[in-house]
Amino acid sequence: MANATKTSYGTQSCPSCDTLNRVDLARLEDGPRCATCGQPLELDRPHTVAGDALDRVVAGTDVPVLIDFYADWCGPCRFMAPVLDEFARDRAGEVLVGKLDTDRDPDVVTRFRIRGIPTLIVFSAGREVARGGSARRPRQPRAGCHASEATGARAVVSARALGRRAPRRGLARRCSPGNARAAPHSAR
């Protein structure tokens, strides 16, 4: 008897024309393209999610969806970006990774009660299942610690995106969306 596999789909907005596209995640190697403009849809990296499309992206995806609530001016958010890039690349087809700019969508910040950024929220079956925020500096792995746990953010992202409970630790320095326009530190 043939081994039947369930096809998983993800919903992603096109980076060129903002059209929402439903993508067969089992066929990522075929190079999915936007149905409207034909541009490639790259699911091996975080994609931008607009606030008005967030509900449709989360509800229209069969795999867990990790959304990074960030702002361009936020230092810890920039620090976490390469970790999310690596996570999206390693988990392409298993987890859909998106980024939502809190400055462009303040209504979403209020709706999800975002108190500081970066904030990571994992959705599964259209519902929030985990939340965390971390922008820790990389540290040396402990003995017996998997390499993917070397960075606090990566460990939280990995565990929560796959439905496991992440260890509760103190959160690293985070930015407050309300302090977006704070004066920059002066050079000493």
Image (cartoon, helix red, strand yellow):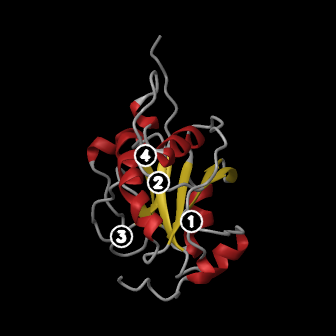
Horizontal and vertical percent position of residue 166: 62, 39
Q: Could you tell me how far apart the alpha carbons at marks 1 and 3 are, in whole angstroms?
A: 28 Å
Q: Nearer the viewer, mark 1 or mark 3?
A: 1
Q: Are marks 3 and 2 in contact (CB under 8 Å)?
A: no
Residue at image x 64%, y 38%? Answer: 167
Q: Could you tell me how far apart the alpha carbons at marks 2 and 1 are, in whole angstroms?
A: 20 Å
Residue on which the image places disc 4: 24
Residue at image x 58%, y 75%? Answer: 52
What secondary structure is found at the residue carrying circle 1? loop
Residue on which the image places disc 3: 15
Residue at image x 36%, y 64%? Answer: 35
Label 4 vs 3, first from the N-terminus: 3
Label 2 vs 1, first from the N-terminus: 2
Residue on which the image places disc 1: 174
Q: Are marks 2 and 1 in contact (CB under 8 Å)?
A: no
Q: Is residue 8 above or below residue 172?
A: above
Q: Are marks 4 and 1 in contact (CB under 8 Å)?
A: no
